[in-house]
Every structure is written in structure tokens, then in C-alpha cells.
Image: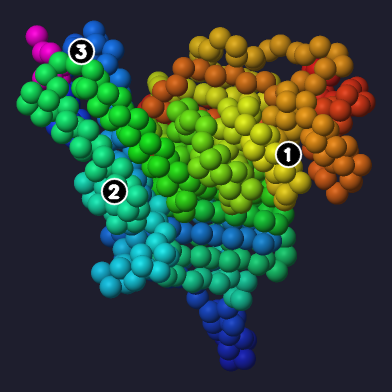
Amino acid sequence: MKMPFWIALLWCGCLLGPEGRAASRAFSNPEEPRMLIVEAFNGSVVVEGSDFDEVEATIGPEFSSFLNRSGSRLLRDSVATSPVGREVSIVEENNRMTIRFRSKGVDQTLKVRVPGNVNLKLLVRGSGAAGVNGVVGEIEVECLQGGIYLDRIQGPVIAHALNEDVVAKFAKVVPGNPNFLSSLNGDIELVVPEETDASFQLEYFNGEVESTIPLTLLPGSDLWTSGEVGTFEPSRVAETQRRAIHFRIKNHNGNIIIRDYPKEEANEE
Amino acid sequence: MLNCEDVQERLIAALDEGRVDDGVESHCLGCASCRAVKSQFESLFRNLDELPKPPFMGTDAFVGAVGAGRFEPEPSRESVSAWRAFCDLIARWPAFGVEMAVCLVGIGVLLAPGGSSTLENSQARQSLELLTEEISVLNESLAVLRLQQASASERLRGVGWIEANGQSNDIIIQALAEVLNTDANVNVRLAAIDALSRFTDEGDVRETLVGALETPQSPLVRIALIEALVPLNLPSSREVFQAIVADESYHEAVRERARSALGLSADESTGGQIL
């Protein structure tokens, strides 16, 4: 059936609506270290590392749960997105780019495609979650209400979630970098390639520690004991002998889970 | 078989190349003095190599920024050559340059022919002690410099070094207090609490920890502060705990810890594990 002219015009208008194209920006000097700061005041954020030099921001529907406890790759499928409007501002100066996102509703996700080796600081101040996939630079993430899900990363990673889980799956762990994961109310799950020679400093209060990696604890470490009735019981601390790859994990109400996965799977990443 | 003088001559060059030969290693295994010097130098070279790279700026802009005190190195995961980092540090911190000059004088005294032919010589021993102390001061300066970096991992590295190696002095304590009260990152503040907890014999540190409870903090930081203060049993901290328990604007987990610290309602604490 022949489309009436006015319908075709309306359809074209929708394609070229007031939002226009995706917001994108380049760093001043791609050859120098690059810093990306993403601040979300509402809504969730997903940051995907790529081979592109430009940063591109789009908006998508609600952030679905990316957690996969079987250990397979997280954040595998991209959510469908639409162009951004005034919800997003991008400013770049001297290789330091800041993206601010104010979602129109709590069910929106900002998706940011970035160069894979950028250093990232991600702050989700509202009710959303934070996801990072394939970024191999330094990652600093704080999430007020939602969870933090990190996949195919290398560290250093410094992540704090106030009220949800922190999941960090490393494709490779770079020695010598400090890694610190913390949560007040939520589980913390650390996944590393098998045979990663790492040490751990674990602090937890109301929860348990599970590990598929054997932990040879230092004297004085406290994994399974409980305190005496009526006494103030501080957080339990369990430490292994310090190595070049070191993880510090601090949890208050939640479990600490440490897993490793086969190297063949790491090589496929 | 190498003697101490031979080792001293070879050590600096070897560490700069990143390779210490077997002769030096085996001497250090048996000589406590040389082992201490080697350890100090290794720490210094490691710190210099890990310094962040300055931002990319045109020369005029860079000189202007340094002169105006606006120099803020950008975070970088790439290692910087030790010499470049050394020059940048001296440009920024003239005092550091003075300290390095003292170190170099100390090295010169040690290596000068006839000046220190054997470590049994008391003059050489004093020079070595001076050198060791200066290197320690340098490492401390580098750690404090790290606390001012834009990168959270660099700040965490600085706090980590202080916790493992730092001596109690005003500069260190003041630097850690500033991190605890003003750092933008929750985990860096948590690490600062652990570092400060090493120095709780100092009155300033105890006051700093109590004062930090009353400043805006993440709930997890407040809980860590409560846990650090309980063993000290300070009257001032008990007052703050009471205020927290009475104030419903505090996070419930924080109020619960404060309650537990005061010995109130013990049956309300953690999921059955403590009780």
C-alpha cells in the first residue's frame, strides 16, 4: 500500500527528532593518558570499552541485571539505545572529559562507549546501577543505591557500593596496582583467572567468606569464629601473605565470594 | 667475593638498570648493613618509577601552571622514567631537591676513595645512617606527594606505603587527617583510618579520629571509625557514640554499631553471629 505523504513525513520527523544523533566527543590528545569522569544523578550507567578513539553517549531503557553467577561473561549484549537530549552534557579539556547525566526517569540507562584504555571515574549518585565492560585502565566507581558490575577489567579497581552488590571479573590482573572493593549492604564477588597469584585482605562483619581459591591465612586471621555475648565485636580480618597482586575487600552486611575461572576462558575474552 | 665497598659502588647502577647481579645479592644476604641500604634504595627507585606522568600541556602553559601552584598531575598507569619523574619532582618541590642533594653527598662520602674504606670505620657508619635516614625521609615525601594525586589508586598507594612504613610525625599525621576528612573516595578514607590507627598513641590522632566521626562521612567510614575508637575507650568518643545513637539521621547500620560500642541492646547486633 502506498504510504500517505504525511505519514512518511511524520516518520522521517521521528528519525530526525529534537534529540538528533548520539552525543560524542574526542579527547584532545589520544596519544596521552585520558581520564573520563561520568556522573549520573539519576538512572544507571553502562560504560563499554572499545577500539574507537571517540567517546559516544546514548540512552537506553532500564538496566537489567547483568549478574551471571556461573562465571560466564557479563554485559555480553548491548541494550538498544536512542540518541541523547539535554539529559547529557559532555565537556572535555586537556584529555579530561566529564559526562553528566540527569535521567528523566529512574528507568533510563546512559550507555557510554569509550576507548578501552581510558582511566575511568564513575559516580552513580541516584538510584541506578553501574556497569563497566572491557575498560582496562584505572577504574574508580561509587554507587549510592544500585550495584556495581565490572567485566573484562584489569585494574586498578577501587569500587564502593552503599546498598548493593559489587561484582568484579578480571580478564587479567596487573601486578603492583591497588584493588579495593567495598560494600555496606550487599555481596562482594571477585572473579579472577585461575592461577592468579594474589593475596587478600578481607574484612567482613555480617556475612561469610567463600573462596574457590585456597587461602593460606596469616596468624591472627579470623574467618569463622564468633564473638562472646555482650562484647563489642569488630569486623573480622583475614589476610594472606602479601603478593604483587593484592585485593582488599571490605564488607559489612553481605558475603565475600572469591572465584577463579579457567585460563582458556580468559584467553577468549 | 665482594666487600661492602664494592657492593655500594655497584648497587645504584644495578638498581637503575633494574638488575642486581648475583655477587651483590649474595653479599647482601650475609651483610645486614648492605641489605638495609639495598632495601632503602629499592624502595626509593620503586617510588620514583611509579610517580604519575604530568599532564600534556604546552611548555608555556606548564610553566605558568607550576608558577601559579595549579599543577595537578593527571593519573597515569604508564610508568615514568625515573629520571624524568625525578626532574619533575624537583621542579615542583625544591625541598625534595635539597634532600636529594644531601643523599648524593652521603653517597659521595661513602664511595670516595679512602673516605670509607670499610664500614667498621665509624665515620662511614655515620654517613650510612645519615643516608638511610635521608632515603627514608624521601620515601615519606613521595608517599605524601601521592596523597595529592588526582588518581584514587595513587592516593591509595600513598596511604598504603605510610601504613606499612611510615613513622609518626606531624606531616604524616596531618596528611592522613586531610585524606580522612576530605578525600573524595570512600575506600581511600577507609585506608587512611587503618594507617592512622597505627599512631593512636599520639593525642592528635585520637582527636582526629573522634572529630572525623562528626564530619560528613559515608556510613562505612563511620563504622570503621567506631571500630577504631572502641579499643581506645575515650570519653570523647563515647559522647559522640551517644549522639549518633540518638540521631535518626544517621544510617541505621552506623547507629547499630554505635549502640553496640556503648554496650546498649547487644541483642540487636549482627545476624546471630556475635551473640
Looking at the image, can residue B225 be seen?
yes
What residue is at 92 percent from the left and 26 percent from the top?
Answer: B265
Between B204 and A15, the one lying in front of the other is B204
* Residue B158 on image: x %, y %: 46, 40
Crowding near pointer 3: few (<14 within 10 Å), some, many (20+)?
Answer: few
Looking at the image, residue A265 lies above or below residue A30: above
Report the amino acid beneath label 2.
Gly
Segment colored magenta: B1-7
Circle 2 SS class: helix
Between A18 and B84, the one lying in front of the other is B84
Q: How many marks?
A: 3
Circle on res. B230: none
What residue is at 67 percent from the left and 66 percent from the top?
Answer: A103
In the rendered structure, which disc, 3 or 1, sits on the residue that comes first in sequence? 3
Looking at the image, residue A90 lies above or below residue B29: below
In the rendered structure, which disc, 3 or 2, sits on the residue that comes first in sequence? 2
Looking at the image, residue B155 lies above or below residue A22: above
